[in-house]
Image (cartoon, coloured by chain):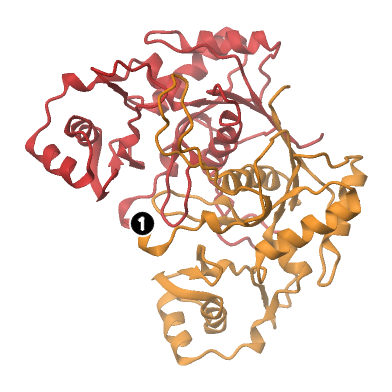
Chain colours: A orange, B red
Amino acid sequence: MLGSLQLIPLRPFPLVEPGDDLAGLVAAALRAQQLQLVPGDVLVLAQKVVSKAENRYVRLSSVTPTPAAQELAAQADKDPRLVQLILDESREVLRVRPGVIIVEHRNGYVHANAGIDRSNLQQDPDDPQVLLLPQDPDRSAAALRDRLATLCGVAPQVVINDSAGRAWRMGTVGIAIGCAGLEAVRDQVGDSDLFGNRLEVTMPAIADELAAAASLVMGQAAEGTPLVLARGLQLAASEAGSGSLLRERDMDLFR
Amino acid sequence: MLGSLQLIPLRPFPLVEPGDDLAGLVAAALRAQQLQLVPGDVLVLAQKVVSKAENRYVRLSSVTPTPAAQELAAQADKDPRLVQLILDESREVLRVRPGVIIVEHRNGYVHANAGIDRSNLQQDPDDPQVLLLPQDPDRSAAALRDRLATLCGVAPQVVINDSAGRAWRMGTVGIAIGCAGLEAVRDQVGDSDLFGNRLEVTMPAIADELAAAASLVMGQAAEGTPLVLARGLQLAASEAGSGSLLRERDMDLFR
């Protein structure tokens, strides 16, 4: 249907191991579904598979918490070693309550527990491990885009998404923590509306909306689908990454 | 493709006038594209067409601002009559800065300028009008769902979306201000992850993710597309509306 957007889960997608060639796995998943990339295609990857490929695992037994982490852990009712990792991954702690520490991640986004996750990991109960966010998700997205251009002959736009809580509203939504090749926030200022009036300032956060859309599809399958092909959009190109999604602190009325 | 989600813009969609039978227009738009509703279909409507059908227009010349509205208008650099409407539509003013008044809307969502809009309206420059949000978007969504069940033989799930700014992040995303027939927030607590570990608390805000996905498609067309059919999901049913998306103030660390 003209103008329609299709979100296609690429599955089965293998469990990803440290050092895996993620672009190669993506290309294989496309081939397995007999899909060929076309210009305008966007690939949305769950943060978790990027982190796994980049071996962002940390065993809690390897972490020695500082006194500051121990104090915060008591407030948040969390493992002090996990809290140490949260602090290491953050610029600033914004809020604390039992069960959650909301920080500004060193990459700029506000995120609960610095996005550190322990679900969907193979766990040794005696020596649990956690998974950090990718070191630099924009760089990861750009590398995937480049490598897929080589493997597939077409450079897809790439979004790396994660689930995030929000102020004001319940539930999590997919957000873009990294992207490559697309304009993350579209600036429509100066465009005209249906009646030729100048539009009020409207800047859709395209990459976040895509991240949320893909999250819907990723979450539908019992087994989890970390890779979604979004086809049918023609999004503006940009090599600027995801930084335009981040509100500067002094422009943020709710921090 | 199995498990894929299709977001189909239903266009051309007519300009909606007060008193129009919106369900009838939706049914006609489906027929025009030779689409028949099937179980699991979700229709996402832009708030604006619902408000127009419900005649939520107000001419600013009809409004007399109170002194409180005049004072707030000076702070926000806005028309005092518009500010009066914002106050009338709100429970509480949360933040003010030039150009924006962020409120808790009387329906519970935190929203800039109480969601009152003046773009995409036919304007008499000497007597401008604005458009308020629907009186009760959950009721509007439920009524559409019921009427479409009669007209089409299948009751679609319905989401009414609007564009909203956010704390922490730049740009707007689609959010659900009303819905009918679907579970707005899915509670996955107690489910197991890929490795059989108990999932940490994950509650995807399904209706918001759908609202964001549809917003991507609505915004693609130059002429605007206020109606999107989302096909391919099988969302849990609920008649509870959109209230589960609203974070109670005392559970909100950022208000």
Where is residue B55 shown, x and y percent of the image? 33, 15
Could you say which is closer to the camera, residue A188 or residue B178? A188
Left-right relation of B34 to B91: right
For badge 1, the amino acid type reads: Asp
Tell me the quarter of the image containing the C terminus of chain A. Answer: bottom left
Tell me the quarter of the image containing the N terminus of chain A. Answer: top right
Query: Total marks drawn?
Result: 1
Which chain is home to disc 1?
B
Q: Which residue is mark 1?
A: B252
Q: Is residue B197 visible?
A: no
Tell me the residue at 12%/31% (across/down): B65
Tell me the residue at 40%/64% (across/down): A249
Left-right relation of A25 to A118: right
Where is residue A181 shown, x and y percent of the image? 70, 51
Tag 1 secondary structure: loop
Where is residue A133 shown, x and y percent of the image? 64, 68
Could you say which is closer to the camera, residue B232 or residue B120? B120
Q: Is residue B182 visible?
A: yes
Q: Up-down: is B221 above or below A19?
A: above
Q: Quadrant of residue B198?
A: bottom right
Disc 1 residue crowd, few under 14, some 14–19, many 20+, Cα 10 Å: some
Tell me the residue at 53%/45% (across/down): A205
Name the residue furthest left: B67
Q: Quadrant of residue B195?
A: bottom right
Could you say which is closer to the camera, residue B21 or residue B122? B122
Q: Up-down: is A92 above or below B8?
A: below
Q: Quadrant of residue A36?
A: top right
Where is residue A54 shown, x and y percent of the image? 76, 71
Name the residue furthest front: A190
